[in-house]
């Protein structure tokens, strides 16, 4: 969703919280935001951390599977092998 006009990363996070309120687990929500989107598009080379796949990696202070709020506390982002954001 964050790739659509008028949306941003924080609005995508808000949608993740809404999904948990509807009964999805944090793990399921993270899959919806990564792997499932790529699979729905029929693209198997993105959205997963595997050999020969393309992935951006977000490092949080703690595990977002335990608390989605951790997605708002990003320590570092790596995109296509390049560090693009480091916590200040």
Image (cartoon, rainbow, N blue to C red):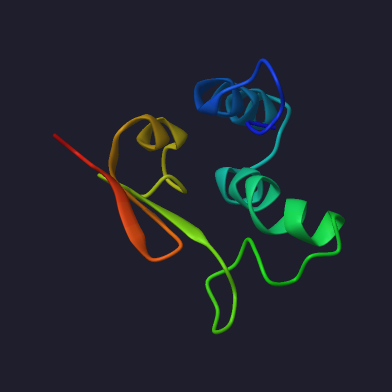
The one of 15 and 66 positioned closer to us in this rendering: 15
Position of residue 87 relative to residue 77, above or below, is above
Q: Quadrant of the N terminus?
A: top right
The one of 63 and 82 positioned closer to us in this rendering: 82
Position of residue 80 relative to residue 65, above or below, is below
Name the spot of residue 21 as percent of width and height, x first: 66, 24
Q: Residue at x 19, y 39 (%)?
A: 87
Kindly indicate the quadrant of the structure image that contains residue 47.
Answer: bottom right
Position of residue 10 relative to residue 70, above or below, is above
Q: Residue at x 36, y 50 (%)?
A: 63
Position of residue 80 relative to residue 88, above or below, is below
Q: Quadrant of the C terminus?
A: top left
Position of 72 compared to 18: left or right?
left
Name the spot of residue 49 as percent of width and height, x first: 52, 71
Position of 59 compared to 13: left or right?
left
Label count reads: 0
Name the spot of residue 15 as percent of width and height, x first: 65, 25
Name the spot of residue 40 as percent of width and height, x first: 85, 55
Instruction: Point out the residue furthest to the top here.
Output: 6
Instruction: Point out the residue furthest to the bottom here.
Output: 51
The one of 77 and 20 positioned closer to us in this rendering: 77
Q: Residue at x 75, y 57 (%)?
A: 38
């Amino acid at each position: 969703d964050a790739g659509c006009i008028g949306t941003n990363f924080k609005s995508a996070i808000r949608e993740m919280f809404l999904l948990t309120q509807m009964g999805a687990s944090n793990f399921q929500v993270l899959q919806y935001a990564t792997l499932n989107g790529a699979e729905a598009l029929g693209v198997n080379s993105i959205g997963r951390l595997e050999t020969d796949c393309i992935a951006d990696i977000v490092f949080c202070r703690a595990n977002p599977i335990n608390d989605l709020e951790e997605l708002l506390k990003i320590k570092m982002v790596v995109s296509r092998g390049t560090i693009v954001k480091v916590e200040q």
